[in-house]
Amino acid sequence: MITEVLMPQLGLEVTEGTVVELLVAVGAAVAKDEPLITLSTDKADTDVTAPAAGIVREIRVELGETVPVGAVLALIADTADEPLDGAPAADGGTAAAAPSAEEPVAAPVTTVPAAEAPAAATARVRASPVARRAAREHGIALESIAGTGPRGRIVLDDVRIAAASAPAGAPTAAPATTPAAPGEVEIFSPIRRAIARRMALSQREVPQYQLVREVDATHLLAQKDAAASAVQSGARPGVNDLLIQAIAEALARHPDVAAVFVDGDEPGIRRPSSIDVGLAVATDRGLVVPVVRGAHVRPLRELAADRARLVDDARAGRLKLEDMTGGTTTLSNLGGFGIDRFTAMVNPGESSIVAVGRVVDRLVPRGRGIAVQPSLAVTMSFDHRVVDGAVGAAALAELADLLEGGMPWRV
């Protein structure tokens, strides 16, 4: 029997993937669920596994090729000599049937056994997608690394140890991508391509408006210090964790802002069962938005631990698809870059985004005099199809009140 290996649907918004690693060669015997091909999508790197045990008879993609969901990546047969009659051809047709007895038959083509093929030596190395990417970035041959994972699979820590122990000046492989020379076109990475597509979609299809509120950050900073002191081990809560909890609380109190637009013949809105807040994280590969789940009900110590894990995974390229989907809203904080205030674009599939800058001391009137107050500019962008101006204003006013002292913090 011939089994097709298809490009899977790796998330609701994923439409294509780029081949970054061929893990097996034609002629290789594979077990069911064994990784065959590593694909890079706009969300994460993912291994495509064998849907059945057998012999790899064809590989229909090349390194660097971008393939759509549903495309045939490879063919697996029960035996090495099983005819491929009836299997879909690479061009979408059907493979030619075997010649009849009356027709002249060409001499059989001798195929080099997989064990002797030069590529087979590297194709059988077991490694996780993130380990393979890290090895490419460090210029380390996977064959030189001893894997400590299940069945000897190479994991990220194995690559890190190998990179740390590599002698200075050791020869390295060419980088996975080479920047284009000045004046030449540099092809987007999958993540950059996704950012471009989603931001264009946001600008084109989401009618957005922005509201800005200057918030007294005195209470926020004091609560950050108190929460950090209360958590003696693990990740200590920071400003982003408090912002995430407060944003989730504000949306829980204003459910219309948490709803999302649903297009179709009869447009409507869908209300989420949980307030899940995305956090925009800058990485070497581009912007990613991991999602903190249940932010409206979880204590700060849990949010901080989850946020720390997600940020670490984002920067190491370890995020899974489920870590980056299903957000209700997003927090983007550019205060660490010295930005006072800015406007962020609503992520398609959400109805709002919160943009905050740095905390700045400002002179404010107080009583009959002037006082210095730490202030934080909070800008919210809304999808006007779902959130009217008055509704958005009420939500932002609620968030400001929570940050200035009205928040029932859950530490």
Image (spheres, helix red, strand yellow):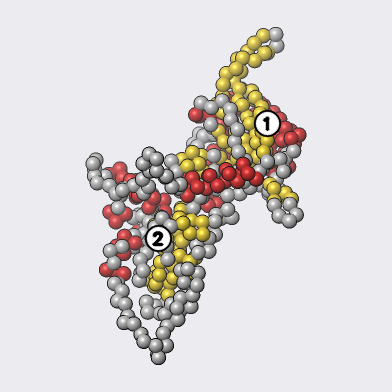
Q: Is residue 28 above or below residue 357?
A: below
Q: Position of residue 85 (x, y in %)?
A: 45, 79
In the image: residue 379, left or right of residue 135: right
Residue in front for this viewpoint, 89 or 317: 89
Residue 339 location, x and y as percent? Answer: 53, 27
Please rate how many residues cluster around mark 1, counting C-alpha atoms within 10 Å: few if below 14, some from 14 to 19, many from 20. Answer: some
Residue at horizontal 40 percent and vertical 79 percent from the top: 82
The percent coordinates of residue 271 (x first, y second) are 71, 48
Amino acid type shown at disc 2: Glu
Residues tagged 2 and 1 counted as in contact (Cβ below 8 A): no
Q: Residue at x 43, y 72 (%)?
A: 76
According to the picture, the residue beneath numbered tag 1 turns out to be 211
Query: In percent of the image, x 41 and y 51: which residue is there?
Result: 130
The quadrant of the picture occupied by the C terminus is top right
Question: What number is the disc on residue 148?
Answer: none
Q: Nearer the viewer, mark 2 or mark 1?
A: 2
**Element carrying mark 1:** strand
- In depth, the one of 266 and 77 nearer the eye is 266
For label 2, the crowd category at 10 Å Cα-Cα, with few meaning under 14, some 14 to 19 and many 20 or more, is some
Furthest-top residue in this view: 368
From the image, tell me which residue sits under label 2.
62
Image point 55% across, 52% down: which residue? 322
Task: Inspect the image, locate mark 1, and give the three-letter code of the amino acid beneath it.
Answer: Leu
Describe the element under mark 2 as helix, strand or loop: loop
- C-alpha distance separating marks 2 and 1: 48 Å
Tell me if I can see residue 32 in this picture. no
Q: Is residue 158 visible?
A: yes
From the top left corner, tell me how far across and down residue 151 is, in percent: 37, 61
